[in-house]
Image (cartoon, rainbow, N blue to C red):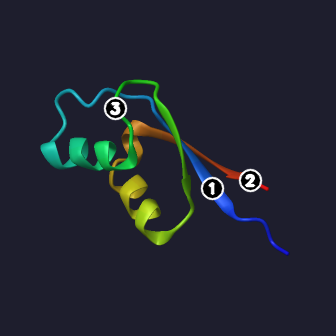
Amino acid sequence: MSKEKYLKIKLVRSLIGHPQKHRLVAYGLGLRKLNSEVVRKDCPEIRGMVRKISHLLKVEEIEKP
């Protein structure tokens, strides 16, 4: 039985001065404020959102039982 993989995503750079699309992607991930963290399932949709604003994020893979 394999464990599911998750991504721990943290907003480390401000959204000020970035395009509205980048802000919407951050809000879609659930990141509202600077240094806020969320845990999301590792799937292609989330990976695409992370890739779009990767310069604003810190991401690490984790496993949940």
Which residue is farthest front? 65
Residue 33: name its quadrant: top left
Labelled disc at residue 32: 3
CA separation in Å, label 2 and label 1: 7 Å
- Figure check: 34 above or below 19: above
- Per the image, label 2 sits on a secondary structure element best described as loop
Instruction: Please give the name of the residue rendered at 38% of the width and 48% of the height, measured from the top-left corner.
Output: 29
Q: Residues within 10 Å of mark 1 (few under 14, many from 20)?
A: some
- Per the image, label 3 sits on a secondary structure element best described as loop
Contact (CB < 8 A) between labels 2 and 1? yes
Image quadrant where one finds the C terminus: bottom right
Image quadrant where one finds the N terminus: bottom right
- Figure check: 30 above or below 41: above
The three-letter amino acid code for the residue at tag 2 is Lys
Residue 32 placement, left or right of 16: right
CA separation in Å, label 1 and label 3: 20 Å
CA separation in Å, label 2 and label 3: 24 Å
Q: Position of residue 61 (x, y in %)?
A: 66, 52
Label 2 or label 1, whichever comes before in sequence order: 1
Instruction: Please give the name of the residue rendered at 39% of the width and 24% of the height, measured from the top-left corner.
Output: 34
Residue beneath disc 1:
6
- Figure check: 57 above or below 35: below
Q: Position of residue 54 (x, y in %)?
A: 41, 47
The three-letter amino acid code for the residue at tag 3 is Arg
Instruction: Please give the name of the residue rendered at 52% of the width and 68% of the height, measured from the top-left corner.
Output: 43
Residue beneath disc 2:
64
